[in-house]
Structure formats: C-alpha cells, structure tokens
Amino acid sequence: MNKERLAAFTDAIVAIAATIMVLELHVPKFSTFASFWDERSTFIAYIISFFLIYTVWYNHHNLFEKAKHITPRIFLVNGFWLFIVTLIPFTTAWVGSDPNSFAPEFLYSFVLLLWSITFHLLDVQIIHDNPHAQPDESTRLVYRSVLYGLYIVSIILSFIKPVLAISLIGIGTVVLTIVTFTSAVKE
C-alpha cells in the first residue's frame, strides 16, 4: 500500500468528520446573546471534539512520518481507527443535545477511549513493522495511562454526573492540545 495514498485518504476522512460536526451548530432563533447561550451545549461539545480531532490528526501525521512502508496490518488498524473517527460527529451531536444525560456522555467517553486505544495500537504496529521507527511520547506508559484514565473516569462520571464527564474531557483536550503543540515547538 502506498503511504501517501493512505495518508491522503485518512486526511479526507478526518476532514469530513470535523466538518460534519459543524452542521449540528444551529443559528440562534433570535439575534441576542441569550439566544446564543441556549445553544452553548452543542457549541462546547463541537469545540472540544474539533480540537481533539485536530490534535490527534497532527499526531497521526507525525505517526505516519515514522513509517517507511505500510503493511496490511497497519492498513487494517488505521481503517479501524478511521471507523471510530466517523463515530465522533454522532456522539458529539448527542452530547451537545443533552449534556445532562447518561447515555450520550457514556457513549462519547467510550468512543474516545476506543479511539485512543486504536491510535496506540496503530503506533505500536507502525513501530513493529518499521524497525527503524522510534517510539515517541504518545507510546509511553505514563502518557497512555493518563489518557486512558481520563476516559475511564469520564465513563464513570457519566453514571454519576454526566455533565462532569464532558467537562473532564474538555479539560483533558485543552491539556493534550497544549502538551502536543508545546512539545512540537521545542523540536
């Protein structure tokens, strides 16, 4: 499989997923800030998911830079990762429509956990199939433990106080974005 072709396909799917999410943002009924405030849940869910997708897309780009060749296993894991990406617009819209309910918050947190695990598997597979490739921060146990812990705690919070689940994911996304792009500037 041609690496550039797979990267281009992946970029297209990620771009479409990010774009589809904006369709859930509705123009407020009235031209007032109060009317805009009524749409805040959807807007906040969109912001969180957009920056999460954008940051992970950047990491995916760096991940593919390590690969000299793409094996069928890499192709398969990347496909599963992309499948999960396509679930994010749906779960984001659901969370935005009802941030105080268990089911949307649970599913959103669960999808993000699966997405993170699949990304890690993709990273491991690329390193395995490209012996020259070096692991980066995202494959380290501490980094992964914090990320998985965040999503697991978010899943638990969805049972107790659902709005706290999205709040935790929002805070985690801000931290992930800052860490990712701060370390990129240092390189």
Image (cartoon, rainbow, N blue to C red):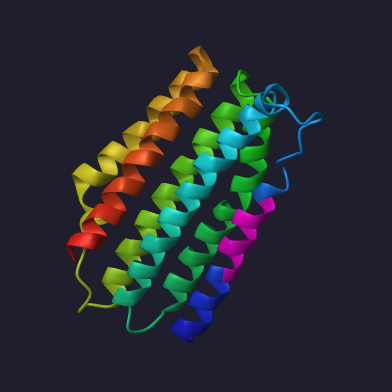
> Residue at left 67%, top 33%?
94
Give x and y (percent) for residue 112.
48, 42
Q: Is residue 135 left or right of residue 111?
A: left
Q: Is residue 129 left or right of residue 57?
A: left
Give x and y (percent) for residue 91.
63, 39
Tell me if residue 119 comes above or below residue 179 in the rendering: below
Which is nearer the eye, 35 or 129?
35
> Residue at left 53%, top 69%?
11
17 in magenta: yes
Tell me if residue 153 comes above or below residue 90 in the rendering: above
Q: Is residue 19 left or right of residue 160?
A: right
Give x and y (percent) for residue 96.
64, 31
79 in magenta: no
Which is nearer the eye, 145 or 33?
33
Number of marks in the rendered image: 0
- Residue farthest along the top direction in this orientation: 160
Q: Quadrant of the C terminus?
A: bottom left
The kind of secondary structure the magenta stretch mainly shows is helix
The magenta-colored residue range is: 12-20
> Residue at left 50%, top 58%?
81
- Residue farthest along the bottom direction in this orientation: 2
Give x and y (percent) for residue 120.
35, 55
